[in-house]
Image (cartoon, rainbow, N blue to C red):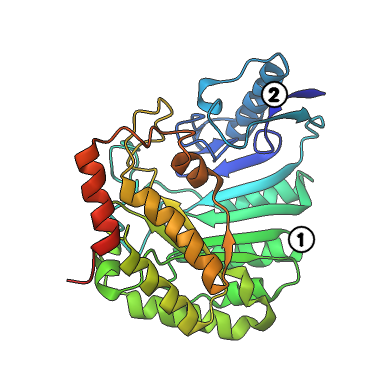
């Protein structure tokens, strides 16, 4: 049947810090159903089926209308299988990135002590034949490698031939990630370095671990051989911090020195609370840095992974990126061009 929908609604589940939800791509919704609720998983699946039926009737939730993954085409019927799981670890982190949403007004009710265990949930999906053998599982936010159950989950999913991706700050070298990268099913790791210098790293992450992260990335590269292109170094562009040529050039210097072949870039959307009313202002320097990063990646021969949400933001499809005053725009452009190490 042809209708507007997306792959996430038709088979994704988010194991977040507050409970279940069927989509991770839209930050403002849907609401979580807490794990402690009776039949929480079943309630989440009921919501999934309802939104699918609504979309078949042309009823699109406001929170979905700006999503770059929304697409009108012939969709297959939902067969009850989960093709994507996103495991969020908001229990612990070994950094304190100033752009992180935990403890901010973005998620005002989040407590770092909120606890849940993902392993029993994933085991239950497998036992009930709800998980496809080619399912994609992503680990992210705060720091996945700090989960005590992380190695066990990875080993279990590798045994089921699932495809895995870990988004990490790279402060801890985790041997099971090396095993994961060396497996034959295109598993990936994305390490958010966000800069090219120790000073800027400390400003962003609020921990002094730049050299440790670089060394850990180098170790992953050396131990994965031909699969080293599955290691991505990420650069989140932050206004008045790393949105300049100097820091981007230093970032690529680091990539070259440790053998990283794949990069990606994003813009910080946490501060804007995914404002789909297009009232969020994006600094000109951020936009320029975004495109400069892309050009440098191509010029230097790096593979550049796409970031659909970031593209939507910078291309003015989600936010209003062009409403800043001429004077602010000029200052922002000068910052992008001439900012250098203090």
Instruction: Provide the secondary structure element on which disc 1 rests.
Output: loop
* Image position, residue 301 (x, y; %): 57, 72
| x 37%, y 43%: residue | 270
Look at the picture and state if 269 lies above or below 245: above
Which mark sits nearer the N-terminus, 1 or 2?
2
Instruction: Provide the secondary structure element on which disc 2 rests.
Output: helix
Q: Quadrant of residue 139?
A: bottom right
Tell me, yes or no, if residue 183 can be seen here: yes
Which of label 1 and label 2 is nearer to you? 2
Please state which of residues 312 and 67 is positioned toward the viewer in this rendering. Answer: 312
Please state which of residues 128 and 275 is positioned toward the viewer in this rendering. Answer: 275
Q: Is residue 176 left or right of residue 212?
A: right
Q: Quadrant of the N terminus?
A: top right
Tag 2 residue: 52
* Image position, residue 163 (x, y; %): 70, 59
CA gap between label 1 and label 2 equals: 28 Å
> Looking at the rendered structure, which numbered label has been put on residue 39?
none
Q: Quadrant of residue 229?
A: bottom right
| x 56%, y 30%: residue | 38
* Image position, residue 126 (x, y; %): 74, 50
Please state which of residues 181 and 250 is positioned toward the viewer in this rendering. Answer: 250
Q: Are marks 1 and 2 in contact (CB under 8 Å)?
A: no
> Looking at the rendered structure, which numbered label has been put on residue 160?
1
Q: Quadrant of the C terminus?
A: bottom left
Tell me, yes or no, if residue 233 can be seen here: no
Disc 2 crowd rating (10 Å Cα; few below 14, some 14-19, many 20+) is: many
């Amino acid at each position: 049947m042809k209708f507007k929908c997306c792959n996430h609604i038709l088979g994704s589940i988010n194991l977040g810090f507050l409970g279940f939800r069927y989509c991770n791509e839209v930050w403002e919704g849907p609401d979580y159903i807490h794990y402690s609720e009776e039949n929480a998983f079943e309630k989440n699946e009921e919501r999934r089926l309802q939104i699918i039926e609504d979309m078949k009737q042309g009823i699109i939730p406001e929170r979905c209308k700006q999503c770059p993954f929304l697409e009108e085409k012939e969709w297959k019927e939902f067969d009850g299988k989960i093709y994507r799981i996103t495991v969020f670890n908001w229990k612990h982190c070994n950094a304190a990135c100033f752009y992180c949403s935990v403890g901010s007004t973005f998620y005002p009710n989040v407590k770092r002590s909120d606890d849940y265990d993902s392993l029993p949930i994933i085991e239950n999906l497998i036992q009930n034949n709800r998980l496809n053998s080619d399912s994609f599982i992503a680990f992210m936010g705060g720091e996945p490698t700090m989960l005590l159950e992380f190695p066990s989950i990875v080993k279990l999913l590798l045994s089921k031939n699932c495809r895995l991706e870990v988004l990490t700050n790279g402060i801890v070298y985790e041997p099971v990630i090396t095993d994961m990268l060396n497996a034959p099913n295109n598993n990936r790791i994305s390490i958010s370095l966000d800069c090219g210098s120790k000073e800027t790293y400390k400003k962003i992450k609020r921990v002094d671990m730049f050299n440790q992260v670089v060394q850990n990335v180098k170790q992953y590269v050396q131990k994965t051989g031909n699969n080293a292109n599955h290691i991505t170094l990420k650069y989140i562009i932050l206004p008045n911090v790393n949105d300049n040529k100097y820091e981007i050039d230093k970032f690529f210097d680091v990539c070259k020195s440790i053998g990283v072949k794949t990069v990606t870039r994003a813009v910080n959307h946490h501060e804007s609370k995914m404002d789909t009313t297009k009232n969020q202002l994006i600094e000109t320097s951020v936009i320029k840095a975004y495109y400069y990063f892309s050009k440098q990646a191509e010029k230097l021969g790096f593979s550049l992974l796409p970031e659909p949400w970031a593209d939507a933001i910078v291309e003015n499809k989600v936010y209003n990126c062009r409403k800043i005053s001429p004077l602010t725009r000029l200052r922002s452009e000068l910052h992008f061009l001439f900012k250098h190490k203090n």
